[in-house]
Amino acid sequence: MPAYGSTELAEVRLLPTADFSYNSKMPVTLQSIREARERIKDVIYHSACNYSLSLSRLCNAEIYCKLDHLQVTGSFKERGARNKLKLMLEHGEGKAGVIAASAGNHAQALAYHGQDLGIPVTVVMPKWAPLVKVSNCRSFGATILLHGESYEDAKHEALQLAKEKSLTYIPGFDDEDIIAGQGTLGLEILEDVPDVEAIVVPVGGGGLLAGIATAVKALKPSVRIVGVEPVNAPTLHESLKLGKVTRIATKPTLADGLAIAEVGKLCFDLIRPRLDELLLVDEPTIARSVLKLLELEKTMVEGAGAVPLAAAMNPSCNLAGKKVVLVLCGGNIDVTVLSRIIDRGLAADGRLCRVTACVGDRPGSLARLTAILASTGASILDIAHDRHFGPADPALVTITATCETRDFEHIKEIESALQAAGIEFTRDT
C-alpha cells in the first residue's frame, strides 16, 4: 500500500497510512476510461508529451511535459465534458439543457462541447472568475451568471437553478463520466512515455488525479503518482490526514482553478489507494513556475497548470534521476494579471530585489546610493525618495529602490556593498 507524503516548502511530513484497498466495484474503471477514449477521440486532441532539456536540468530529472493546456478551450476539462455530454445524448438526456458551477475551465469545456452537440449550457461563475474565461464561455454561446464570492456560492446557486428550471447539473469533478474522461489523459501518457516512473498531477476537486491514477495504476502500478496542491487550498491534504472528505476554508491563490473547499467524495475514494505522495507548494513557487515555463519552454500556463513544476523543482519531491511527466493541465491565464505574476516569479527567482535604505537628507545622498547599486551591476527599475513617512529623525529620509538582479548571489553582493558603505537598509522578500 503506498504511503502518503506531504511536502510543504522543504519539509516532508508523512501522513498515517489508512487501512483500505482497491474497490473493484468502483464506477470508474480502466474499462470505462477506455470506453470514454473511444467516445471522445474524434474531437479531443491527443496532446503532445514532450521532453524538456531545460526543465530536466532545472529539476535534475528527465522531465516530459503533457501539454493538455493546448486543448481547444485551454484545459483538460474538455475530456470529461465531452464524455459526459455525449453519454447524455446517447441516453436521450440533456435536451432541456445543462447547468454547472465553475471558476472557468469546466465552464468553457461545457460551453464549447454543448454548442457543438446542440445542448444548451448555463454556467454559474464566482464574481472573481478570470475575465478571459468569462468572455470565452460567452463566445461559445453559453448563458453566464456571475454569483457569489466563492466556488461554493456559485455551486449552491447552480443547484437551485437546476431544480427551478429542470436543468441537468454537471459537476466539475465528482462524477464518474467526468472522471473517466479525464482518465484518458493517463492512457495517452503511458503510450507516449511507456517507461515513465512518476506523474505529477495538480489537485483541485480531484477529478483529474482520480482519472489519471485509476488508468495508470491499472496498467502500470509501479508508476509513482504525485499530487500537488497550493498551500492556500490543501483540501486533499486535510482529507487524507483525517481519513475522510473534509471541508476547508481556502485562501486566495495564483492557482485559482485549484481553490476548491472540498475534494469530491468519489474522487477521494479513487485517489486514496492509488496516491503515492501529496505535496503542497507556496505562492512564490507557483509564480516562479509560471515564469520558468514561459521563459524556458515558451509555454504560457495558468497557476493551476504550473504547480507540477513547482513540486518538481523542490528537492524534497525526490524525483532526481527519474523519468517524470508533468501534467500541464490549463493555459487560461488572465493576461491582465500575467505581468504581476511574472514580477512575483522574478522576485522568487532572485531576479528582482527591493531595498529600502535610510540615508541623511543632504545633497548627494541619493546619488551615493545609486552609485553603490550601480557598482554591483544592479539595474534600477524604480526608485522612491520619501521625506514624509520616513524615520523619526527629520535629518534622515528613506529611499526605496527596485532593482533587476541576476540571482540571489547577486542580491548578497548588493547587501554587502550597502553594509560596507555603512548604509542602514532592509530588503523585501
Image: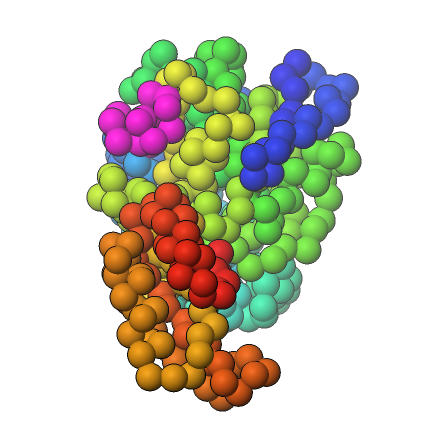
Residue 416 in sight: yes
- Quadrant position of residue 229: top right
- Quadrant position of residue 27: top right
Tally of numbered tags:
0
Please tell me which residue is depicted at 29% across the width and 20% down the height of the picture: 192
Q: Residue 22 lies in magenta, yes or no? A: no
Quadrant for the N terminus in the image: top right
User: Where does the image place residue 236, in percent across and percent down from the top left?
Assistant: 64, 39
In the depicted view, which residue is nearer to us: 1 or 11?
11
In the depicted view, which residue is nearer to us: 420 or 219?
420
Please tell me which residue is depicted at 36% across the width and 65% down the height of the picture: 402
In the depicted view, which residue is nearer to us: 118 or 4?
4
Please tell me which residue is depicted at 48% across the width and 28% down the height of the picture: 315
User: Where does the image place residue 383, in percent across and percent down from the top left?
Assistant: 34, 73
Q: Is residue 289 left or right of residue 260?
A: left
Residue 49 in sight: no
Q: Is residue 248 left or right of residue 357?
A: right
Please tell me which residue is depicted at 70% across the width and 51% down the height of the picture: 248
In the depicted view, which residue is nearer to us: 71 or 412?
412
User: Where does the image place residue 269, in percent across and percent down from the top left?
Assistant: 66, 30
User: Where does the image place residue 195, in percent across and percent down from the top left?
Assistant: 36, 12
Image: magenta residue range:
50-66
